[in-house]
Amino acid sequence: MGVVVSFGSEDAGGDRAFAALRDLVADEMAHTNDFILSRMQSQVRMIPELAGHLIKSGGKRLRPLLTLAAIRMCGYRGEDNVRLAASVEFLHTATLLHDDVVDESGLRRGLSTANAIWGNQASVLVGDFLLSRAFQLMVEIGSLRILEILSNAAGIIVEGEVLQLERASDIATTEDTYLRIITAKTATLFAAACQTAAVIAARPAVEEEALESYGKNLGIAFQLVDDALDYSARQASFGKTVGDDFREGKITLPVVLSFRRGSDTERAFWRQVMEEGQQNADDLAMAVQLMNRHGALSDTIERARHYGDMARDALAIFPESAEKTCLLGIVDFCISRAH
Amino acid sequence: MGVVVSFGSEDAGGDRAFAALRDLVADEMAHTNDFILSRMQSQVRMIPELAGHLIKSGGKRLRPLLTLAAIRMCGYRGEDNVRLAASVEFLHTATLLHDDVVDESGLRRGLSTANAIWGNQASVLVGDFLLSRAFQLMVEIGSLRILEILSNAAGIIVEGEVLQLERASDIATTEDTYLRIITAKTATLFAAACQTAAVIAARPAVEEEALESYGKNLGIAFQLVDDALDYSARQASFGKTVGDDFREGKITLPVVLSFRRGSDTERAFWRQVMEEGQQNADDLAMAVQLMNRHGALSDTIERARHYGDMARDALAIFPESAEKTCLLGIVDFCISRAH
């Protein structure tokens, strides 16, 4: 810990890009926030309490922001933008709740996780509740195509999570399998959040596909950076417990690369700490040292840049606009948020 | 334990009625079973393994049987009957998986529960997978109205489960609250399974409502009997762990009635075993003895008969048919399955 990897000079630019996106769709996002609060209500008290804990805890709302900006870029002027953005955020929040149960996490966004406060039982059920609400909102929008894209996405996300569970702590996981997991777990929802924007605006298939590709590659880049951050961020600014992945024995790309590039002695270390779960107080620092020795963290960020480039190129078919500029800027934001 | 409550003479008639329903829609159900197996496949090995454990374990498939029979009664001749029935069964199976995690059950239908074998993490995720599949099948049917009914049902089911969790072990739970819980948890899916049959057949609203009412009241009766069975069935024939509800401190109607009708000493007993969870080896037998003293089990069945009557009356608007006869017979089956 304490080792900070230099990820380049996109830092300030990335923060500005995020602020620009937030400002661009500030009105729609305010409506979406109100809408989210109103639609997570229930006469069963525990539901808004628990859901509110997570939803109000100040996540970046990156996915609904992307949806709202992409909808505007596509020229849609109706009022279902708020429903679609809320639906995407509900889906995301539901997977977070279930994820924290599965990962037994204790801290998210700098706060105790819902499962740590209310228990796994409530987290499972409120996740189900938000999932149902997401589908109810899609039904209200009335587009079978949107329902198709998002129900398919929900299935793929879960397949990715089960695959990760199957491979949990398998130190021999390949980079390909790792990519398959994060594509399913993370990138699929980014892709759907952007693709459905084209659908709601009734844009041609080529624009649907372009936005899907933008979202997918952005999502992969986002997750790669996230996985690097788990070994390098300062806890306060990051809002997650640094070393979570390490303590859970979760095999992410920094580990995959370090294991493959390491000596026999180093591989024995990785087997012991990740597969056998035998970790001492110094082992996280040792892991970070090995990662830096083999350039595993900086190369993880390099890989992220590669996917970020693909995300940018996917948007090339759209004419210039303030929305497009913001969506391009978000690629920088995702890659630079390491600082 | 070992105390068998006489529930009347519907026994043999009930079994015959279930067999009649199964025979009536044997072809459609065979297709539905094949379809269920084909649509729970995934390249992620753990998913069909775990889902298959539950789905193949020989539940009665009561809900899809009801859907198929109601669809036939409504005169539908298309091929989406199988999709709808499978969707209903996937929804049901998903809630079972999550329910067993929440209840920490070890045995269901005479087999170890999925969470006992594969762990809670896998059960949560595979439940999510089946939920997604259910929605994907509804999208394939292409009816927004069916999506609306079933996504609303999914939300209400979860609200019922959370409400039950909130009230868990609250010995002062009223019969009204108990009814609200089982209506949401159990009857809502029975209602949706029947109502959507009228929707897929494009029948008028009055028939939709009649089938919804039939399903809802049948579901309440079914759950009431289930809750009585938890204190009176022989384990082998019942396929559940007798006394599960008791050990979990779950407040069901037999407990509600016994507590309210009991002496101060008896109430102290109920508080100790249900609220404080202090249970000795003899306490289950004592609980059953108190229930019998106050007629709590037989009155629970009486209440079930009341809802069964309403279910029968709801079908009155339909002309006579083999399907209607079967659906009426299922009311007897639900109430008589105690033996």
Image (cartoon, coloured by chain):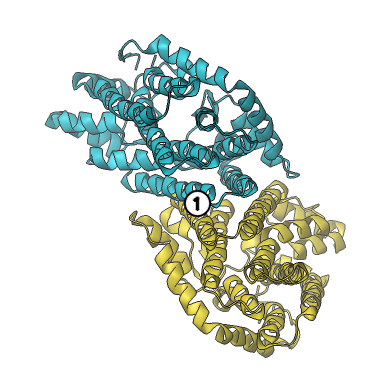
Chain colours: A yellow, B cyan
Q: Secondary structure at mark 1?
A: helix
Amino acid tagged 1: Glu
Residue B168 placement (x, y as % from top left): 33, 43
The one of B322 and B63 positioned closer to us in this rendering: B322
Residue B320 makes an appearance in the image: yes
Q: Quadrant of the N terminus of chain B?
A: top left
**Label 1 packing within 10 angstroms: few (<14), some (14-19), many (20+):** many
Q: Chain of mark 1?
A: B
Tell me the residue at 27%/43% (across/down): B177
Farthest-out residue, left: B264
Instruction: Point out residue A129 in the picture as x, y percentages from the top left corner.
Output: 47, 53
Please state if A329 lies on the left or on the right of B260 as rendered: right
* Residue displayed at 71% across by 49% down: A163
Residue identifier under label 1: B148
How far from the left and from the top, in percent, is residue B235?
45, 18
Residue placed most toward the observer, B178 or B19:
B19
* Count of labels in the image: 1
Q: Which quarter of the picture shows residue A12?
A: bottom right
Residue A205 or residue A49, whichever sits in front: A205
* Residue B186 location (% of width, % of height): 41, 37
Residue A249: which quarter of the image? bottom right
Q: Quadrant of the C terminus of chain B?
A: top left
- Left or right of residue B256, residue B119 in this image: right
Q: Is residue A280 visible in the rendered structure shown here? A: no
**Above or below, comparing residue A302 to residue B282 in the picture:** below
